[in-house]
Image (spheres, coloured by chain):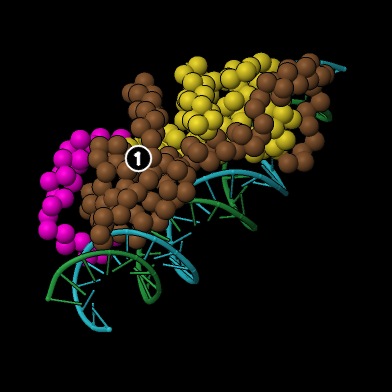
Chain colours: A brown, B yellow, C green, D cyan
Amino acid sequence: MDDFICAEEKVHDKLVEDVDCSMPDEAVLCELSEFFRVFGDSTRIRILYALSRSEMCVCDLSKLLGVSQSAISHQLQLLRSSRLVKYRREGKTVFYSLDDEHIFSIINIGLEHLEE
Amino acid sequence: MDDFICAEEKVHDKLVEDVDCSMPDEAVLCELSEFFRVFGDSTRIRILYALSRSEMCVCDLSKLLGVSQSAISHQLQLLRSSRLVKYRREGKTVFYSLDDEHIFSIINIGLEHLEE
DNA sequence: TGCACATATGAACATTCTTTCATATATCGG
DNA sequence: CCGATATATGAAAGAATGTTCATATGTGCA
């Protein structure tokens, strides 16, 4: 991070400064990247998509996705701490669902983008 | 991935099957997660945000973000191969810009979500 | 051609993630 | 209370990722 910096005759210094001013705080963009990172794993995206169809228990998700119960549980915990899913217990079973319908719209926007 | 599977009296089997049918191909959701993964790094998100304000050269980005030229270049290559940015050369300088205004709208949707 | 500047890139290193394995916790039925 | 089932979790292993360092490529100018 400490290369010498290009010596360009300061033509761009004004631009850099202007862009700097118009950028959100670094902390905000960090949070944003953390938010997107959660969607950046195929197991988690598949969990989220599945939950957009219906609430499901851990075991159902495990069967549906062909991923071990333990791995699903770990990912659900991450999704929970990111406030993307919520859960309710019914006897021995725990049902998970999307915390917010908005989540699904984000997934859809991504899907639309992939379709170009 | 080979735990025994919950023995639940098949109450949920129909549900699992239905959800399975309504899910996009695993490959599609994998691509989707790869797409989101690109946004899931603070350096890349900051690059993308900066480029949404103006096209910039590698050196400007390096200065603006306080990240080494090499690190910026590596990330730009990743962004290029994900088709999120394009570039044009002008003499010694290479200017990068968003490949598509749509990219910025995705960032904004994320930001809106963070604001709850 | 030779030098300086801007950018690109391969390899190594450090860190972070994801899954697995073993085991703990919670709930229900007998 | 005990055993069985469903889920959670800590630790370790393995894979993937981001940065650095050294160096290569490409361009302009003297």
Between B89 and B3, the residue placed more toward the observer is: B3
Question: Residue A15 colored magenta?
Answer: no
Q: Quadrant of residue B61?
A: top right
Q: Quadrant of residue A47?
A: top left
Between B42 and D3, the residue placed more toward the observer is: D3
User: Which residue matches tag 1?
Assistant: A98
Q: Quadrant of residue D25?
A: top right
- In the picture, the quarter occupied by the N terminus of chain B is bottom left
Percent across and percent down for residue A16 are: 73, 22
Percent across and percent down for residue A9 are: 82, 19
Q: Is residue A115 visible?
A: yes
**Residue A65 position (above or below residue A10):** below
Q: Residue at image x 52%, y 24%?
A: B108
Q: Residue at image x 57%, y 27%?
A: B48
In the image, taking residue C29 as reference, residue B55 lies left or right, namely right
Question: Residue B13 colored magenta?
Answer: yes
Q: Is disc 1 surrounded by few (<14), some (14 to 19) or many (20+) residues within 10 Å?
A: many
Q: Is residue B94 visible?
A: no
Q: Residue at image x 80%, y 36%?
A: A4
**Residue D2 position (above or below residue C2):** below
Identify the secondary structure beneath mark 1.
strand
In the image, taking residue D22 as reference, residue B5 lies left or right, namely left
Between A55 and C5, the residue placed more toward the observer is: A55
**Residue B15 position (above or below residue B24):** below
Pointer 1 chain: A
What residue span does the magenta drawing correspond to? B1-28
